[in-house]
Amino acid sequence: MKKRRVVVKIGSSSLTDTCGGLSKPKVQEHAAAIALLMKSGHEVVLVSSGAVAAGFRDLGYAVRPGTTAGKQAAAAVGQGLLMQAYTDAFRSHGIVTAQLLLTRQDLMRKERFHNTGRMLEELLHRGALPIVNENDSVSVEGITFGDNDMLSALVAGLVHADFLAILTDVNGLYDGNPNHDPDAKKYTFIPEIHDGLLRQASGAGSSVGTGGMRSKVLAARTAGSLGVHVFIGTGDGAEKLLDIVEGRGDGTYIGISSLMSGKDSKRWLALCSVPAGSITVDGGAARALAGKGTSLLPVGITSVSGNFKQGEVVNVLDEDGELIGRGMVNYPADTVSKIIGKPGDEAMKISGGTTPEVIHCNRWIHLKTKEAVR
């Protein structure tokens, strides 16, 4: 079959023993499955949780700590232990491993986003296995990736992956809660993540699985918006990942049509940039921006919100307040406010600028909905 670039996400529940600590046999099983995938010619990036599980016992905790400080301390101890377990397991298969710890802030900065992508490309080119984890010991609550699910989707987009396999302890998405409804039926294939399914997956004991399924569904939607096909489910044995990639996995396959493609700068704008304000446009500008190759001109702007600077990213909204897209502005907020509704020549005289575009088409990404990117 076609050789593919695959991101594999392994959650804590797929790495821990009955007491919540790191299970070396499970690590070795995952390593054997990834090794078989790589030996079949596929390129693989592993996104793995498990640092807290690996470290809490060495700090004297009887169970996984519940406080933020306790989790961060356990992660600081456990990250090295987790990587050692992976390194030892993959060494037996002749595979070199590389560690990458990320926080959401690392991907919010455009230069870091691009540098991270180039480094991952080099590792893959050299035949190494990048192992990515959130830097739990320094991540701040509220701007984390969420059990690495969203991190795996962003990494899949960053490396232009073909496929994202999210391994969990539930064998896919259901139309009811399989823990309580014996008639609940599993979705074997979903063409796209629609809003109804997202609402179903809202929290523990939901109708599409157990706690944490919502973050996986959101991750699948984000990955799908980048043209990455997704699998959510489980598996056992050394051939489980090969089976998943070849369509024989025990779970749900999600094939979402691509919302965006092309340059990494566009992907960064859509997925990782932090808008510093917003610009509202009229109906004509909204329709024009939804097409290809159109820049935002002052004549189509109706209002400005925020105190953004030149070169910062802003959301662009239609008259109903719905998100149209996102772009980098050529002018600060106070200048844009002065040229609202003005034709190009007049706007340039007022702004003193050399270009009439407030957002050039090369620094613009059209987005379908807010949920498609967050």
Image (tube, rainbow, N blue to C red):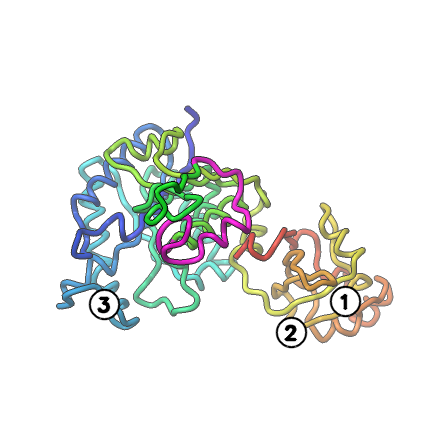
Q: Which residue is drawn at 21% across and 60% down?
A: 78
* Crowd band around label 2 with a 10 angstrom C-alpha radius: few (<14), some (14–19), many (20+): some
Quarter of the image for residue 370 reads bottom right
Q: Is residue 189 above or below residue 10?
A: above
What residue would you read off at disc 3?
Answer: 65
Which circle, 2 or 1, is nearer the viewer?
2
Give the residue drawn at x 23%, y 34%: 237
Say which amino acid is labelled 2.
Gly
Query: Is residue 210 on the magenta stretch?
Result: yes
Image x and y of residue 40, in percent:
33, 28
- Mark sitting earlier along the chain (1/3): 3
Label 1, on which residue?
A: 353
Q: Which amino acid type is marked by label 3?
A: Pro
Mark nearer the N terminus (2 vs 1) = 2
Between the residue at mark 2 and the residue at mark 1, the CA separation in whole angstroms equals 21 Å
> Could you say where residue 280 lies in the image, as x and y percent from the top left?
72, 65
Query: In terms of secondary structure, where does tag 3 sit?
Result: loop
Which residues lie in the magenta part? 188-212
Quarter of the image with the N terminus is: top left
Q: Can residue 191 be seen in this view?
A: yes
Q: Element at badge 1? A: loop
Sequence-earlier tag: 3 or 2: 3
Instruction: Using residue 351 as the reference point, say whether residue 327 is left or right of it.
Output: left
Q: Which mark is residue 306?
A: 2
Residue 118 drawn in magenta: no
Give the Cα distance between marks 3 and 2. Answer: 40 Å
- Name the element at disc 2: strand
Dot 1: within a 10 Å radius of its alpha carbon, few (fewer than 14), some, or many (20 or more) residues? few
Question: How far is the residue under mark 1 from the one under mark 3?
Answer: 56 Å
Which three-letter amino acid code belongs to the residue tagged 1?
Gly
Look at the image and tell me whether residue 130 can be seen.
Answer: no
